[in-house]
Amino acid sequence: MSSTFSLAPKPYIRESNGNLLPPKSMLTTIRAEVITVPKQRNTRIFPEISIQGIPVADLHVQEIVQRQSKSIAKVGTSRKSQFDPSFLEEAYQRCRNICAEYAKTFYLGTLLMTEERQKAIWAIYVWCRRTDELVDGPNSGHMNSEVLDRWEERLENIFDGRPYDMLDAALTHTVLSFPLDIKPFRDMIEGMRMDTRKCRYQNFQELYLYCYYVAGTVGLMSVPVMGIAPDSLNSTQSTYDAALYLGIGNQLTNILRDVGEDAARGRVYLPQDELAQFGLCDNDVFARKVTDQWRKFMKEQISRARCYFNLAEEGASQLDKDSRWPVWSSLLIYRNILDAIEENDYDNLTKRAYVGRAKKLLMLPMAYTKSLHTPSLIFPEY
């Protein structure tokens, strides 16, 4: 998963022969409590790609912008926190520790934000990670729709002021402090449902919708916390769109980075029709042989991911100045993952592209410099 900020990549193990093994979760201390239930037939229908020609993801963004704009008036007035200050302080400290351990570079980027925004972003990060762990963590073998339904009920309790544990309480307080709507959180859970029932995507339209659910939603959660610059000349919608595009770009990059790892689990997150256009199919992915056709195919996929980063860059400078650094850090690091795939001669079947810690740290000053840019009016291209 990834997002406006990046959910930390799962650790992985390399055997002496160089082969990648599926990752093991290190997140034992914050693992979401789930109850194993008998597996039942899932009756949910895969979401429609469009409604009257308008992409479903775009409709979701429009709805979320409207809802969170209406919530601005409620913040700090009718909704009051009932938590003891010392309890809240410990809750946020736990979220901070988790973010610092599993998303080190992003965490450093949050340190320029105001204290209130820092805490809120840490709380959102932890909830997203726990949600991701339901499907990709050690309990994933017991995962089914009933477990995710219960997790969604727990989310509703968070928004209703009835958190289950201390980490949930941090998010409840964040919801009371910022104009956050429940919809992007629910949509992320829907993305987890898609992961439990679907491991092939026939075209990019289907894959785009999946990327919206599991990663684009994080950007939509984050905009109300990060804030839009008072001197921004662009519409609120355009800033949300940029946050969505960063999430899409990050998730596409995750997919390209993890092709070999996902193949080991029988999953192919690549558009089937585009594979076919290059004379490829699932068997070629499972064979893990880098051919000229594969290189040509990967060039196209990398180019598309970069396009989304370009779109995201246009909106990054529209955020409040204290919130831009972590966003630019994510942008630069994920772009470098794409560079690393190219440097590996497009071998993401047996190798996992990554950006080393030293290189990440070197990017922080560059990201900071870019975060200082003054917002300007951005005209859409036609």
Image (cartoon, rainbow, N blue to C red):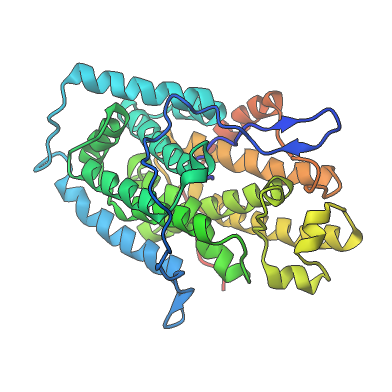
Q: Residue at the top extreme? A: 86
Q: Residue drawn at (45%, 74%), measured in percent from left and top?
A: 48
Camera-nearest residue between 66 and 320: 66
In the rendered view, would you say 315 is above or below 362? below
Q: Residue drawn at (50%, 55%), measured in percent from left and top?
A: 196
Image position of 365 (left or right of 91): right
Residue 159 position, x and y percent, is 22, 44
Q: Residue at the left extreme? A: 78
Residue 232 position, x and y percent, is 39, 50
In the rendered view, would you say 356 is above or below 338? above
Q: Quadrant of residue 110?
A: top left
Image position of 5 (left or right of 24): left
Q: How many marks?
A: 0
Figure quadrant of the N terminus: top right
Q: Residue at the front extreme? A: 38
Camera-nearest residue between 40 and 202: 40
Figure quadrant of the C terminus: bottom right
Camera-nearest residue between 59 and 26: 26
Residue 248 position, x and y percent, is 55, 55
Q: Quadrant of residue 112?
A: top left
Q: Is residue 363 something one can see in this rendering? A: yes
Image position of 310 (left or right of 44): right
